[in-house]
Amino acid sequence: MKRAAPAALAVLSALCLASLTACGGDSGSEADSAGEPAATASEQPREKQQSPEDRLKQMVITEPDVSGMNVSDADVVSSDNSEFAFAKSPQEVTVEKPVCAPLAYAMNQLPLGEPQADVTRSLSSSPSEPFTYVMLTAYEPGKAASALAGLSEAVDACTGGFTAKANGNTSVYDSVTAEEPVAAAGDQSLAFRSTLTFRGATHTVHGQAVRSGDVVAVYFSVDGLAIANVRPSDAKLPAAVVKAQNAKLG
C-alpha cells in the first residue's frame, strides 16, 4: 500500500544505516410529461460515492492554506528516490520492541493500524530548512481510535528508545518523550519528540497525531540537511501548518 519515504527523510534513513450516497428523487405512480411511467426510487441514478482517498485529497493541506510554504505530494517527490526509502510499507519494518512499531511508522510516513487510504504531503519554506510531513489516513468506523491508541501506548512505553530495521536500513532512536500538542484539535490529540545521535551530533525530531472522526492526521518534522552535515538539530513542528491542517479535518 505504501511507498518510499520522502526525499528529506530518505536522507535520515540512509544516514541512520550507519548508526502510517446520495439517492435522489422520489417514487410515484403518475406518468411524466412524455407519457412514460416515473422511475421508482430504486431506479433513480445514484450519486457516485466518494472514495476514501478522494476524500483525503480534498482535506489535505495545500499551499493557499499556509503562507510562505511549499507543499508537495510526498509520494511524487520520493518516486525517484525509492531505493533510499527506509520502508515502503509497515510490513517491511521490524522493531525489537513491538510496542514501539507505531512510532517507527509515524516517523517514516507509514500508516498506523488498518487504514482504507492515506495521502502524504511534504512542506518546507526552503530546501535548507527542516521539512514537515503531513499524513492523512482514513479508517473504517472505530479503527481510527484504535490506531491512535497504539501510538499513544508506544509513546508511553518507549521512553528509553528503540531500534527499527527495514530493507537493510537501521534507525536507532535514543529516547521518546511525550509533549503538549502544538495545536490540539479533533476528538483526540497527542504529541511527542524523539532524539537520535549520528556521528556525535544529537538530533531532535517532533511528531503529533490528531484524530477527527475516522481520519487521523500525523505530523512529523526533521532537519535532514543538518543530519547530513553532522550538526545538531531540533526540527520543531510549525504551528501554522498544524493549525491549518487541523482546521480542514472538520
Image (spheres, helix red, strand yellow):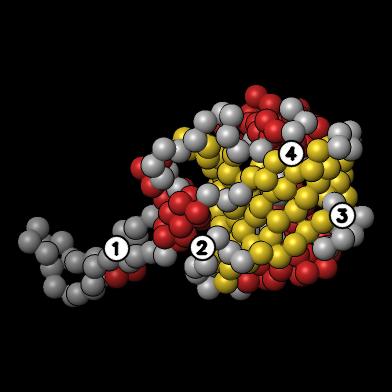
Whole-angstrom CA distance, mark 4 to mark 3, is 20 Å
Secondary structure type for disc 2: loop
Which amino acid type is marked by label 1? Gln
Disc 2 packing (10 Å; few <14; some 14–19; many ≥20): some
* Number of residues whose C-alpha sits closer than 10 Å to that of mark 3, classed few (under 14), some (14–19) or many (20 or more): many
Which of marks 1 and 2 precedes in the sequence?
1
Mark 4 or mark 3, which is nearer to you? 4
Residue 41 x %, y %: 29, 70
Question: In 3D space, how far apart are the residues under numbered discs 1 and 3 (Cα atoms)?
Answer: 56 Å
Q: Which residue is mark 4?
A: 232
Q: Residue 126: x, y in percent? A: 52, 31
Whether residue 27 is situated above or below residue 203 in the rendered picture: below
Does label 4 or label 3 sit earlier along the sequence? 3
Q: CA distance from mark 3 to mark 2?
A: 27 Å
* In the image, residue 54 above or below residue 8: below
Q: Could you tell me how far apart the alpha carbons at marks 4 and 2 are, in whole angstroms?
A: 26 Å
In screen coordinates, is 171 left or right of 85? Answer: right
Left or right side of 247 for 221: right
Q: Give amino acid for label 4.
A: Pro
- Identified at 19% across, 66% down, the residue is 38
Residue 149, quarter of picture: bottom right
Kind of residue sitting beneath label 2: Ala
Q: Which residue is mark 2?
A: 183
Q: In the image, what residue occupies the spot 70% across and 33% down?
A: 226
> Which numbered disc covers residue 162?
3
Residue 250 percent coordinates (x, y):
42, 65
Is 38 placed left or right of 143 in the picture? left
